[in-house]
């Protein structure tokens, strides 16, 4: 058998020429990478005008007028190069949970796919509330594959979970544990999960993950089963719709990909290297509130153990100022302002805290928009509750985005954005006040992006309630990063 290979090579030399054989043996052709795009013909065959394919041919969706869902495939190239570049450079020890990063399988000679990843975005325009359990989604291919979507956490997973997947592959060293936690931190932050409803005027996006599709697959479909479009009087899901989205596999054109095609805007992910060494004044403003009857009742009912929730200068703010000055070269100047006072002076960051409605914000959205357009940065550090009680912050955030001029969108903030690393490195979204109060629902961290730059943040976690505790280093580090980011943003 060993003697047959040289003979075969000689035959190839004689029949095809030595030059072409040399190139094939020693310089094999580059492997073709594939991506998935909406199958426009298959979607049109459904004969339902609510379905659509975007003009760039990358996004497929269903527009019910009162709500909308969009789906797009995220190629390994996008995930590695644009979404998680810093966590896709360490081969088998890379923190990117969705790909094998730059690791090359020695048996294959190339990097295989780890998963098939799709971004799902849900917009609720005027419906009461929507919801979606991504674990009910199924991917089916023309080769007979039937893949269930992965859950995030192993506990209560319907099928397999990302946590279980990586636990089976985790070593016992400290490095292995660190890689595992990094991967799970990214997964917890970016994967879509079945949580609180999506209320009117709100949106939600995240990733759904399936087993990898092989190169020989030509066509596939994603079944979105039991998408919840309504709830009954007992707050139980009562109205459902099943949706289907068709894709086809084509060679990947890397040149056609744009940075604004990734999960979150990353126009400001590259920050001046001197940002960590910023010095000077940090002009910090906190919005005052009116302690009206509605807010007082909600405060007493929901947070009875917290006193002076509406104090415009709680202990946590003072502790934060001390922390910033101890961990940076910044001198913090704090001012409590009302919306009509906000634009009379220049501030770097405006902090809005609370747990309930603020009539003053409702009447002064234009002042907040003007603050942003002058270069200011706004943080909505407000929680919501597991029992379905929702603050007006969601409406304020949407209204604020609508007041801004330019290319504006609300989206998740990618975890490699500067607010997670500009001064202190943070692996994922820190735990918020939900770690103390069991009635708090950990919300998604969303941002308003204006011309690709993050200009407002909705934490959904009431970090300010933790700042008085020095052991809450991650919450304090995030606040420090926000301060540095707001100043570097202003100085550009």
Image: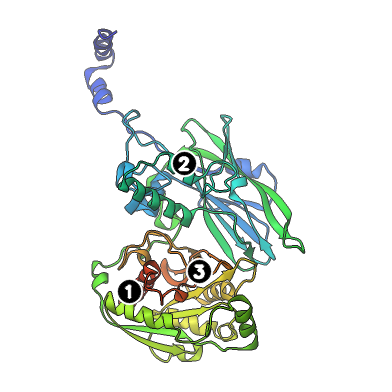
Within 10 angstroms of label 2, few (less than 14), some, or many (20 or more) residues?
A: few
Q: CA distance from mark 1 to mark 2?
A: 37 Å
Residue holding disc 3: 436
Q: Residue at x 60, y 80 (%)?
A: 299
Q: Position of residue 60 (x, y in %)?
A: 57, 50
* Residue found 40% across the figure and 56% down from its top: 259
The mark lying in front, picked from 1 and 2, is: 2
> Which quadrant of the figure has residue 67?
bottom right
Q: Which residue is mark 2?
A: 165
Q: Quadrant of residue 418?
A: bottom left
Q: Quadrant of the C terminus?
A: bottom left
- Residue annotated with mark 1: 484
Q: Is 50 placed left or right of 433 in the picture?
A: right
Residue nearer the viewer, 356 or 169: 169
* Nearest-to-viewer mark from 3 and 2: 3
Q: Residues within 10 Å of mark 3 (few under 14, many from 20)?
A: few
Up the image or down, 23 lies above or below 437; here it is: above
Label located before the other in sequence (1 or 3): 3
Kindly indicate the quadrant of the structure image that contains residue 392: bottom right
Mark 1 crowd level (few <14, some 14–19, many ≥20, 10 Å Cα)? many
Percent of width and height locating residue 202: 59, 66
* Residue 148 sits above or below residue 423 on the image: above
Labels 3 and 2: the sequence-earlier one? 2
* SS at mark 3 in the image: loop
For residue 64, above or below residue 180? below
Circles 3 and 2: CB atoms closer than 8 Å: no
- Dot 1 or dot 2: first in sequence order is 2
């Amino acid at each position: 058998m060993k003697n047959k290979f040289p003979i075969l090579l000689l035959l190839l030399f004689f029949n095809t020429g030595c030059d072409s054989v040399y190139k094939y043996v020693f310089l094999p052709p580059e492997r073709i990478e594939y991506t998935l795009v909406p199958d426009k013909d298959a979607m049109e065959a459904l004969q339902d005008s609510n379905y659509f394919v975007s003009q760039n041919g990358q996004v497929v969706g269903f527009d019910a007028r009162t709500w909308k869902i969009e789906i797009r495939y995220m190629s390994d190239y996008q995930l590695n190069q644009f979404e998680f570049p810093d966590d896709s450079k360490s081969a088998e020890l890379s923190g990117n949970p969705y790909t094998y990063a730059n690791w090359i399988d020695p048996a294959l000679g190339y990097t295989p796919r780890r998963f098939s990843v799709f971004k799902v975005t849900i917009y609720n325009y005027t419906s009461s509330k929507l919801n979606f359990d991504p674990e009910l989604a199924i991917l089916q291919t023309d080769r007979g594959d039937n893949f269930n979507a992965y859950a995030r956490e192993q506990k209560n997973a319907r099928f397999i979970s990302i946590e279980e997947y990586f636990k089976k592959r985790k070593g016992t060293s400290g490095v292995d544990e660190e890689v595992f936690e990094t991967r799970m931190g990214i997964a917890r932050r970016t994967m879509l999960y079945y949580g609180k409803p999506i209320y009117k005027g709100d949106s939600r996006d995240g990733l759904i993950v399936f087993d990898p599709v092989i190169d020989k697959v030509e066509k596939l479909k994603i079944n979105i089963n039991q998408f919840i479009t309504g709830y009954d009087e007992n707050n139980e899901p009562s109205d459902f719709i099943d949706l289907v989205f068709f894709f086809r596999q084509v060679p990947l054109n890397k040149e056609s990909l744009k940075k604004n095609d990734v999960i979150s805007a990353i126009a400001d992910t590259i920050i001046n290297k001197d940002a960590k060494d910023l010095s000077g004044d940090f002009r910090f403003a906190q919005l005052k509130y009116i302690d009206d009857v509605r807010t007082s009742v909600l405060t007493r009912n929901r947070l009875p153990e917290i006193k002076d929730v509406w104090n415009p200068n709680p202990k946590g703010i003072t502790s934060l100022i001390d922390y910033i000055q101890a961990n940076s070269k910044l001198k913090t100047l704090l001012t409590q302002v009302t919306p009509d006072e906000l634009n009379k002076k220049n501030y770097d960051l405006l902090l809005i805290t609370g747990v309930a409605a603020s009539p003053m914000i409702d009447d002064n959205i234009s002042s907040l928009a003007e603050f942003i357009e002058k270069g200011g940065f706004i943080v909505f550090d407000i929680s919501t509750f597991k029992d379905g009680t929702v603050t007006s912050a969601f409406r304020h955030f949407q209204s604020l985005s609508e007041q801004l001029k330019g290319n504006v969108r609300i989206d998740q903030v990618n975890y490699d954005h500067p607010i997670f690393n500009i001064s202190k490195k943070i692996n994922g979204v820190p735990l918020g006040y939900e770690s103390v109060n069991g009635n708090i629902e950990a919300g998604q961290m969303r941002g308003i992006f204006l011309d690709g730059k993050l200009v407002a943040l909705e934490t959904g976690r009431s970090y300010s309630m933790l700042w008085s505790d020095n052991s809450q280093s991650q919450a304090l580090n995030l606040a420090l990063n926000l301060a540095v980011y707001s100043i570097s943003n202003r100085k550009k």
